[in-house]
Amino acid sequence: MDDKPKKIKEVTIKCGYCSHRFPSPIFFGNTAAFDTATTAGNTAQCPKCHRMIHCNRENMTYVLADDEKPGGFVGSDFPDNEA
């Protein structure tokens, strides 16, 4: 089993009001940083409904860097993305 942290390509947030997904203003360089970061108190404004939402692991997902295996989305109910 490989416990080495994997590189993250991008982090996305899902708005709890309108379900729109957008790039996170908070970036994590690898999976270890994502898994252990304290995200309490961080907020972002949804670009669709303009409401302020909390940034936490429960509404965030990430895409692993292209050279990481397995790649792809990690998080709940992704990647379906409405425009």
Image (cartoon, rainbow, N blue to C red):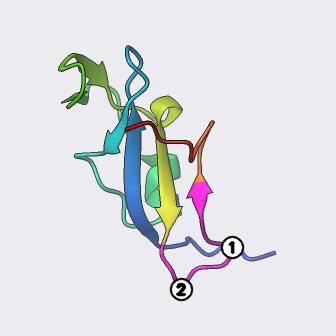
| Foreground of the two, 39 or 80 | 80
| Foreground of the two, 71 or 4 | 71
Residue 79: image location, x then y, percent = 56, 47
For the view shown, which residue lies furthest in the bottom direction? 67
Residue at 38% in and 14% down: 17
Q: Is residue 46 above or below residue 78?
A: above
Q: Which residue is mark 2?
A: 67
Disc 2 versus disc 1: distance between alpha carbons? Answer: 9 Å
Q: Residues within 10 Å of mark 1 (few under 14, many from 20)?
A: few
Res. 24 mark: none
Query: What is the three-letter code of the residue carrying label 1?
Result: Pro
Query: What is the three-letter code of the residue carrying label 2?
Result: Asp
Residue at 63% in and 36% down: 77
Q: Is residue 2 above or below residue 8?
A: below
Q: Which residue is mark 1?
A: 70
- Tag 1 secondary structure: loop
Residue 42: image location, x then y, percent = 25, 30
Residue 24: image location, x then y, percent = 29, 45
Residue at 29% in and 21% down: 53
- In the image, 27: left or right of 57? left
Task: Classify residue 43 by image quadrant.
Answer: top left
